[in-house]
């Protein structure tokens, strides 16, 4: 049997809600800044040992549900073919090169240029020494793929990353073996579950412009392929097509763990999750708007703040974050971004029920980043998106306050972020 | 020809080249594109509004925007960080040669 | 102008040609006690010594090595220079004759710096005597973190999450209990990936 991964057939898009699915699994594009920051926040919350365990378990679960949907649609029949599909799809998503040498009882997997370890080394390797492994996502994929390939229930096997490039090893190696503890069963949060929650969509101001750019950008993203190492470089950042469930499950599991064990730290954890979104928005959105791709597609940025906000809204949609719409904008003062649902809130309601306050942290940080990009970056000078520029946002009197006034997670009909200027 | 770092949050990978020659954007891109092909670069463009040429040995890329005449040099990420500015500069030298432009002046190599 | 009693500190130290006391990070000469041959270039030397220590610190940072109070020894044919940081805000430079063994230069350097430490206490930035009495170590640990953490704007939030200590308590480091300080120290080591803090 020939393996066939037909991207066009496996990929689906809900245009009114700007959600993307691959094999009926919610997927989003995220850059290495966001990925590394979010993992680091979980490390900060739980300590590295528990964090690695949680992140590996969440990746295991997310990839198990995903591959269970995907592999039967590729024609793969034998375990070897199924493992091959997992390797190919992992690389095609920009996560690096994973090689699975596993049997039903487990075995070895190796990784080269894995997104997390490789980009951690590129970004932080010269600044700090890492003391724990970085590739929980690859580990989770490796163990999930082995279970799917050999028709095993989720949680039959367990995995540990034994060597990691972020710790100085030449290659990442994963040992997979029989699980000592059972994994609690879980149900996927897929396309059906997401659709069930979605209400009517709506539009906002400047809709025609946003829609046109988002469509062009999404079409262009569809043409980007990973290189022979399984990495995707675009717009000056390393990009991954990632499982939304992974982001959501590590974030909310760690957050609710903190609520139970150290409630005084709940707010600071929320702040750091928002900061992850801010890093994402600033670096990825900024990188996209400053790129030749954007210049060819939408023209070089003129420096008009509204133009940047419209562009960022289109980017949010194209990356699969949700139907971001502009509801209100007063230059230098006030900005309202509304969406009929985000990949965070739909997951939260499905898995954790209703919350007492908003739970769209990427959405909050991303909206703040949009406002910063519009008002604090001098686009005419063709800025560098350096750590120094980023740090400068946090200096000076003029700052912005962000509030999630409405959220599907707390029973509202939509998610809404209001950003207001504070100080002079 | 002038070369300076281009917006990127990965260290020293992207570089902007601005020729001194007063060429129209489309003419500039056509001239560079043809020269790159003649010198062994591979055309990897997927869109007419973004031309991408790749060098076959180390996979560095030259990206051109016909609408605006923007030229971006993309050094491959496998090149160690300290060597990236030099690689970018040598690619800019090649571009200057193709165009018959002045030798590159670095505005912000580090 | 003599601000400190450097002659007293230098008393009995053989082969010593001079002491420079330099404020950091601005690399300005604070006080000196040197042979006339070195006197003339004192201001210029101070700036260069400051740069030297700064560059070495950057090298160490890039190599993943850490030291709170850095020491450098420079050998030339006619002179032996020993540089050592004193707190965050001072650099001491000792010039010895080249004949002095390096170990002795380090030993004398340490002894003199211990003497000067007392004299310099009155010159802490903004006369922070209160802070010094309360918890200088906690404050220095936090300064160290903010100086070297990769994303300094978020380092205090990360520390708060790692330790479970609320931000408002971290912002008043003098109020931290010994147990809280131990947690902070461990968390800073984790964030920076180092085994211990020599602060």
Image (cartoon, rainbow, N blue to C red):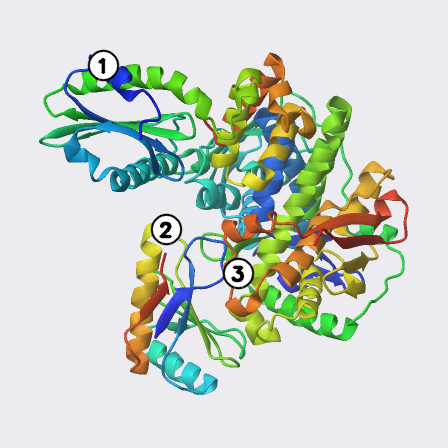
**Co-location on one chain, circles 1 and 2:** no
Mark pair 1, 2: CA separation: 50 Å
**Up-down relation of residue C74 to residue A306 (above or below):** above
Give left or right: position of C42 versus A56.
Answer: left
Q: Residue B81 bears which disc, if any?
A: 2
Query: How many neighbours does mark 3 have within 10 angstroms: few (below 14), some (14-19), or many (20 or more)?
Result: some
**Up-down relation of residue C35 to residue B70 (above or below):** above
User: Residue C156 or A78: which is nearer the viewer?
Assistant: C156
Give left or right: position of A31 versus A64.
Answer: left
| Numbered-mark total | 3
**Up-down relation of residue B9 to residue C88 (above or below):** below
Mark 3 or 1: the one toward you: 1
Mark pair 2, 3: CA separation: 18 Å
User: Residue A326 or C88: which is nearer the viewer?
Assistant: C88
Q: Which residue is mark 1?
A: C11
Q: Position of residue C59 (x, y in %)?
A: 33, 38
Q: Quarter of the image holding residue A287?
A: bottom right
Q: Residue A234 bears which disc, if any?
A: 3
Q: Looking at the image, can residue A171 be seen?
A: yes
């Amino acid at each position: 049997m020939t393996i066939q991964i037909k991207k066009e057939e496996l990929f689906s898009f809900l245009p009114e809600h700007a959600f993307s699915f691959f094999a009926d699994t919610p997927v989003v594009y995220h850059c290495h800044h966001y990925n590394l920051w979010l993992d680091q926040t979980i490390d900060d919350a739980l300590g590295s040992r528990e964090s690695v365990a949680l992140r590996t378990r969440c990746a295991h679960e997310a990839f198990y549900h995903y591959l269970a949907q995907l592999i039967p649609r590729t024609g793969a029949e034998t375990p070897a073919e199924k493992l091959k599909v997992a390797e190919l799809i992992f690389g095609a998503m920009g996560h690096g090169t994973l090689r699975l040498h596993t049997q039903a009882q487990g075995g070895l997997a190796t990784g080269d240029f894995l997104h997390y370890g490789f980009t951690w080394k590129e970004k932080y390797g010269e600044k700090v020494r890492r003391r724990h492994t970085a590739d929980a996502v690859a580990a989770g994929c490796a163990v999930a793929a082995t279970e799917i390939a050999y028709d095993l229930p989720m949680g039959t096997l367990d995995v540990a990353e034994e060597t990691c490039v972020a710790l100085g090893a030449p290659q990442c190696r994963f040992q997979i073996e029989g699980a000592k503890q059972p994994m609690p069963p879980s149900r996927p949060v897929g396309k059906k579950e997401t659709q069930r929650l979605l209400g009517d969509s709506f539009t906002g101001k400047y809709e025609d412009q946003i829609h046109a750019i988002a469509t062009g950008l999404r079409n262009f993203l569809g043409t980007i392929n990973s290189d022979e190492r399984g990495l995707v470089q675009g717009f000056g950042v390393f990009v991954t097509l990632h499982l939304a469930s992974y982001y959501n499950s590590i974030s909310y599991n760690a957050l609710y763990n903190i609520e139970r064990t150290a409630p005084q730290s709940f707010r600071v954890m929320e702040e750091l999750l928002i900061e992850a979104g801010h890093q994402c928005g600033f670096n990825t959105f900024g990188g996209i708007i400053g790129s030749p791709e954007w210049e060819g597609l939408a023209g070089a940025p003129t420096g008009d703040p509204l133009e940047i906000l419209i562009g960022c809204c289109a980017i949010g949609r194209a990356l699969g974050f949700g139907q971001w719409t502009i509801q209100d904008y007063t230059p230098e003062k006030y900005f309202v971004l509304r969406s009929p649902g985000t990949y965070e809130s739909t997951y939260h309601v499905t898995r954790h029920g209703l919350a007492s306050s908003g739970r769209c942290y990427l959405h909050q940080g991303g909206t703040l980043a949009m406002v910063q990009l519009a008002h604090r970056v001098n686009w005419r000078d063709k800025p560098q998106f350096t750590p120094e520029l980023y740090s400068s946002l946090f200096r000076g009197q003029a700052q912005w306050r962000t509030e999630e006034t409405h959220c599907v997670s707390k029973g509202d009909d939509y998610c809404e972020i209001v950003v207001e200027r504070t100080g002079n | 020809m002038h070369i300076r770092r281009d917006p990127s949050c990965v260290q020293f990978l992207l570089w902007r080249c601005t020729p001194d020659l007063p060429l129209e954007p489309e003419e500039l891109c056509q001239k560079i594109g043809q020269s790159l092909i003649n010198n062994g670069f591979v055309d990897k463009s997927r869109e007419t509004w973004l031309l991408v040429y790749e060098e076959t040995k180390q996979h560095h890329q030259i990206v051109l925007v016909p609408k605006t005449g923007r030229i971006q040099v993309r050094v491959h990420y496998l090149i160690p960080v300290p060597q990236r500015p030099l690689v970018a500069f040598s690619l800019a030298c090649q571009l200057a040669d193709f165009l018959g432009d002045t030798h590159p002046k670095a505005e912000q190599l580090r | 102008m003599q601000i400190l009693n450097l002659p007293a500190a230098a008393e009995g130290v053989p082969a010593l040609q001079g002491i420079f006391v330099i404020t950091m990070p601005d690399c300005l000469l604070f006080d000196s006690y040197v042979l006339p041959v070195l006197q003339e270039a004192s201001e210029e030397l101070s700036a260069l010594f400051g740069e030297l220590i700064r560059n070495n610190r950057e090298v160490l940072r890039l190599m993943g090595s850490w030291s709170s109070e850095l020491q450098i020894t420079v050998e030339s044919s006619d002179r032996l220079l020993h540089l050592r940081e004193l707190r965050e805000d001072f650099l001491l430079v000792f010039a010895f004759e080249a004949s002095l063994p390096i170990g002795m230069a380090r030993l004398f350097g340490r002894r003199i710096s211990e003497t000067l430490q007392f004299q310099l206490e009155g010159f802490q930035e903004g006369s922070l005597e209160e802070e010094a009495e309360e918890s200088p170590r906690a404050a220095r640990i936090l300064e160290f973190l903010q100086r070297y953490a990769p994303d300094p704007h978020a380092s205090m939030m990360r520390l708060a999450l790692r330790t479970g200590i609320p931000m408002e308590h971290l912002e008043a480091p003098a109020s931290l209990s010994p147990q809280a300080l131990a947690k902070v120290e461990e968390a800073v080591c984790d964030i920076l990936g180092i085994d211990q803090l020599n602060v």
